[in-house]
Structure formats: structure tokens, C-alpha cells
Image: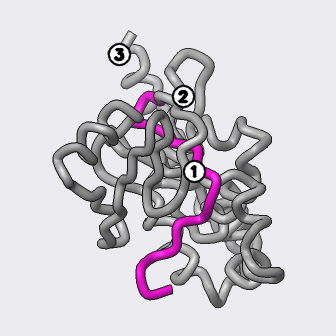
């Protein structure tokens, strides 16, 4: 199966390389067309056989449409499809709605792309941290190190676990890590 898949991809690459430059030039006529026609690497690939990765699971969730729109606006889809393991603390739509009015709309503007990417990477941590692993880290007095370079405190209160002040509502295992659904947008320290 792997050999057939590899041969298929090599054939696609060869066919793509043989295309004349005219098609590529016409697709790049405007920057808008270029953005629409530029593949997003692994983030644009999906199949019906493989287990879903973090991005694919988020895209299929009606409770995470704002998060997916933010990930796309920040241009960080590739981060969520990497091999991992990666843990994502995924705020629900309601969590984004709880931010001050106009915050999400402002962050989604192209001029705020880097700030949005920084906030979103504060919701990702290298490693695989489900509820059990988070409780273990909390017992050891450890914090979670995020991709934004921040540390998030883990608090366990009975069955409730919060990370960076956001309560974990559910945990979903994916092919490249864990999604912890949270009830709050976790802002980097100092914000």
C-alpha cells in the first residue's frame, strides 16, 4: 500500500512538473488568485482511509468554526497537520464569543496575522497531554510549555482540569496528538 501511494505521488509530481508555465502564470495573475491556488502542503491533503489529524477534526466540528477561521487567517494550518505529537487547547465558538466585542473581527484582519498566530500558538503544546497526562503533570508541579513560549498552569479540582485558566470540556485523540476542548481563549501572559 505504501509503495502504491509513493508511486502515485511521484506520478503527480512528474505530471505537475511537465505542465507548461502558462497555466502557472495565469493562476498567478493576481495575488488573490495566487492565494486561492497555492496549495497548503499537508494541510490541503485528506483521504477517507487515514485517521483524522487535529486540523481535520477541528474542521469537522460545528463548535470550532471560529477557531478554524482563525487558524486559516493566521496561515498556520500546517502546524496542526504535522506528525506531532501535539496537544491543542481548542476554544469553542462560545469561548471566542466571550471575548470583548470586536476582538475576533480585529484579529482576523490581515494586518493582525502575526498577533493572531502568536495567540493561537499559545493554545498548542508539544507532546501528547490528555486529561490523565495533565493531572500527572499537575501532581508533579509542572506547567505546560506552549509553542508561543509561554507556560500554562494546570489546576486540578476534583474531576475538573483547567489549563491557563481554561476549563477542559472534552478530550479527543487524533492521529497526530490530542485536542482538549476548552471553554476560554487562553491569552499569552502580559495580554
Boundaries of the magenta span: 174-191
Q: Please state which of residues 108 and 29 is positioned toward the viewer in this rendering.
A: 108
- Residue 28: x percent and y percent? 68, 72
Instruction: Name the disc covering residue 58, or none.
Output: none
User: Are there few (<14), some (14-19), or many (20+) residues within 10 Å of tag 3?
Assistant: few
**Which residue is identified by label 3?**
2
Q: Say above or below: 79 vs 102.
A: above
> Which badge, 2 or 1, comes first in the chain's sequence?
2
Image-quadrant location for residue 127: top left
**Which residue is identified by label 2?**
52
Q: Residue at x 71, y 76 (%)?
A: 108
> Which badge, 2 or 3, comes first in the chain's sequence?
3
User: Disc 2 on helix, strand or loop?
Assistant: loop
- Residue 124: x percent and y percent? 42, 56
Q: Residue at x 30, y 56 (%)?
A: 144
Marks 1 and 3, Cα distance to the nearest angstrom? 32 Å
Q: Give the quarter of the figure containing the N terminus.
A: top left
Q: Does 63 appear in magenta? A: no
Instruction: Name the disc covering residue 90, or none.
Output: 1
Q: Residue at x 52, y 30 (%)?
A: 172
Q: Say above or below: 183 vs 102.
A: above
* Left/right of residue 149 with respect to residue 4 in the rendered view: left
User: Disc 1 on helix, strand or loop?
Assistant: strand
Q: Residue at x 59, y 32 (%)?
A: 46
Q: Please state which of residues 40 and 168 is positioned toward the viewer in this rendering.
A: 168
Q: Main secondary structure of the magenta part?
A: loop
Q: What is the residue that sits farthest to the left in this orientation?
A: 140
Q: Mark 1 vs mark 3: give the one in front.
A: 1
Q: Please state which of residues 48 and 190 is positioned toward the viewer in this rendering.
A: 190
Amino acid at each position: 500500500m505504501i509503495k502504491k501511494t509513493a508511486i502515485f505521488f511521484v506520478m503527480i509530481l512528474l505530471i505537475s512538473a511537465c505542465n507548461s508555465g502558462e497555466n502557472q502564470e495565469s493562476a498567478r495573475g493576481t495575488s488573490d488568485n495566487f492565494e486561492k491556488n497555492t496549495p497548503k502542503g499537508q494541510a490541503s491533503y485528506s483521504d477517507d482511509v487515514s485517521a483524522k489529524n487535529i486540523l481535520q477534526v477541528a474542521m469537522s466540528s460545528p463548535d470550532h468554526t471560529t477557531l478554524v477561521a482563525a487558524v486559516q487567517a493566521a496561515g498556520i494550518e500546517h502546524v496542526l497537520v504535522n506528525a506531532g505529537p501535539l496537544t491543542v487547547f481548542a476554544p469553542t465558538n462560545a469561548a471566542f464569543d466571550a471575548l470583548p466585542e470586536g476582538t475576533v473581527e480585529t484579529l482576523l484582519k490581515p494586518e493582525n496575522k502575526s498577533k493572531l498566530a502568536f495567540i493561537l500558538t499559545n493554545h498548542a503544546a508539544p507532546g501528547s497531554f490528555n486529561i490523565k497526562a495533565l493531572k500527572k503533570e499537575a501532581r508533579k508541579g509542572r506547567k505546560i510549555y506552549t509553542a508561543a513560549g509561554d507556560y500554562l498552569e494546570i489546576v486540578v479540582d476534583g474531576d475538573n482540569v483547567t489549563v491557563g485558566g481554561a476549563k477542559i470540556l472534552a478530550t479527543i485523540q487524533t492521529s497526530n496528538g490530542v485536542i482538549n476542548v476548552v471553554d476560554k481563549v487562553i491569552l499569552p501572559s502580559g495580554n
